[in-house]
Amino acid sequence: MTLSSPDRLRALLKGDQIITMPCCFDPLSAKLIEQEGFPLTFMSGFAASAARLGLPDTGLMSYGEVVDQGRNICNAVDIPVIGDGDTGYGNALNTKRTVKGFAQAGFAAVMIEDQLAPKRCGHTAGKAVVDRDEAFERIRAAVDARNEGHDILILARTDARHDHGLDEAIERAHRFHEIGADILFVEAPRSKDEMLRICEELPGAKMANLIEGGLTPVLSPKELQDLGFKIAAYPITLIAAAMKAMTGVLAELKTGNVATASLMPFGEVKSRIGFDDYFESEKHYDSQKTP
């Protein structure tokens, strides 16, 4: 019997090892993550907004655009995908609809956060959080949607560390767990000591968010596991690598050079995209044609 995507994520969370989770932004990046053997990915709101709209992660992607992007990603891979549900796109009823929509799109989990809308990347200026009651209401609505038959895990995020300090962030996250969240995420701790406090004081599975050049120390997976984290997320690593590679090649093209040494061979490009599998399937159906 094939496990559902949420059940595969539940099985991963029960494992002994930390889950290294590169974050995707489109179906191709998700396929590459899967092809390289990673068991889990996350559709990064930062990276998806950049790739789909060419715009910053400041709440500009609509609910419909996010679900559409996520559905295409989930259809492209077999590994579980976590989706960024932002603030739930409105009140508690909007949040329930968001969770249901993410489950129907094929996500294994949905992240709901306590930022004030329009939200923004957790490592940029200008973010703020709603009051406790509204934050708890969002997570309660998300959990209700899950418990009403929509099989999806709830990843509850708080950005309260930014304006209100780590104590408030930990208290909010603890309440998220009591309400029924499956995974907890305290965004942007500023030191290894703060990361340790998060793991020591909060129950259940915790996620660390590692942005190169961001506010949180980028520790190794081993260090994160020793602290007590279950998931190590890398939200901008792939899109930053892709942007650097593309701008480098474009700079070379300006000089009139064809930078073949910088490129993946065309045969491998075709294979990774799926041409080989397509042609094999095409042969199967061609063989069924009536002579």
Image: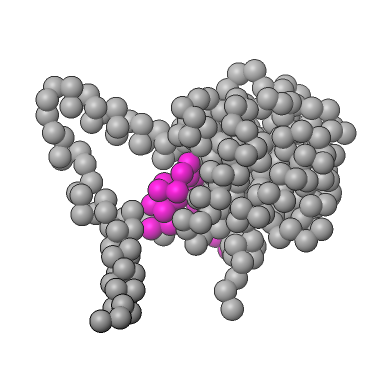
Q: Tell me where the magenta segment starts and ends, as one range.
A: 16-35
Q: Nearer the viewer, residue 105 or 207?
A: 105
Q: How many marks?
A: 0
What residue lies at 76% left-to-right and 33% top-to-bottom? Answer: 90
Q: Residue 102: x percent and y percent? A: 65, 49
Looking at the picture, tell me which residue is in the foreground, 110 or 191.
110
Q: Residue furthest top?
A: 126
Would residue 37 appear left or right of 202 to someone viewing this image? left
**Is residue 168 among what the camera can see?**
yes
Q: How is this picture coloured?
A: one colour
Residue 163 colored magenta? no
Q: Which residue: 22% across, 24% down?
A: 251
Q: What is the quadrant of the N terminus in the image?
A: bottom right
Q: Determine whether, in the image, residue 234 is placed left or right of residue 188.
A: left
Classify residue 93 by image quadrant: top right
**Residue 287, relative to residue 98: is it above or below?**
below
Q: Tell me where residue 89 appears, x and y as whole percent.
A: 72, 34
Residue at the image position 67 percent from the left and 44 percent from the top: 111
